[in-house]
Image (tube, rainbow, N blue to C red):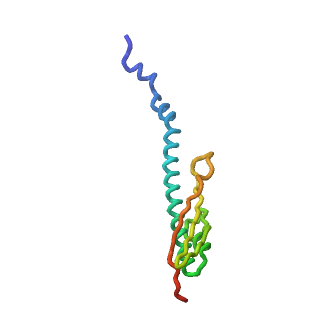
């Protein structure tokens, strides 16, 4: 007659092997979630850079420098177009979206534009 616990001995470690097989999928989902957050953060930082550059340009400051200083140091931000039209200045910023997923390059760029009224007051 067979003992009931004899079968359990052969199944030892099955859960560990199933977990190891599922682990790469879990890591991929986690990295995808982090990447989505990074894309949103880069877009938010592009908006911050555009607003800082537009504010600086409206006060006759250094829009390129202020645009780059307004974002986190590990992101590559730059202000491209600074366009004056009448009583307004419009600045477009670009932030490179880095990748956390191995084997994939950058995820492109985030572009944002901000418009500010030109301050006519003299300092």
| x then y, percent, for residue 62 | 61, 77
| x then y, percent, for residue 83 | 59, 72
- Residue 123 seen in this snapshot: no
Q: Residue sitting at 52 percent across and 51 percent down? A: 35
- Residue 57 seen in this snapshot: yes
In front of the other: 119 or 52 = 119
Looking at the rendered structure, the number of numbered marks drawn on it comes to 0
From the viewer's perspective, tell me whether residue 8 is left or right of residue 64: left
In front of the other: 101 or 97 = 97
| x then y, percent, for residue 46 | 54, 64
Image quarter in which the N terminus is found = top left
From the viewer's perspective, tell me whether residue 48 is left or right of residue 5: right
Q: Residue sitting at 56 percent across and 75 percent down? A: 85
From the viewer's perspective, tell me whether residue 108 is left or right of residue 5: right
| x then y, percent, for residue 120 | 53, 85
In front of the other: 77 or 86 = 86
Residue extending farthest to the bottom is 123
Residue extending farthest to the front is 86
Q: Residue sitting at 47 percent across and 35 percent down? A: 19
Q: Residue sitting at 50 percent across and 62 percent down? A: 44
In front of the other: 121 or 86 = 86
Residue extending farthest to the top is 1
Image quarter in which the C terminus is found = bottom right
């Amino acid at each position: 007659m067979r003992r009931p616990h004899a079968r359990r001995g052969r199944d030892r470690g099955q859960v560990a092997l199933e977990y190891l097989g599922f682990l790469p999928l879990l890591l991929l989902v986690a990295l995808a979630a982090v990447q989505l957050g990074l894309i949103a953060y880069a877009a938010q930082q592009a908006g911050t850079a555009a607003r800082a550059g537009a504010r600086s340009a409206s006060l006759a400051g250094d829009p390129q420098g202020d645009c780059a200083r307004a974002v986190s140091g590990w992101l590559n931000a730059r202000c491209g177009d600074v366009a004056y039209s009448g009583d307004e200045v419009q600045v477009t910023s670009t932030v490179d979206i880095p990748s956390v997923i191995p084997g994939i390059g950058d995820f492109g760029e985030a572009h944002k534009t901000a418009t500010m009224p030109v301050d006519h007051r003299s300092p």
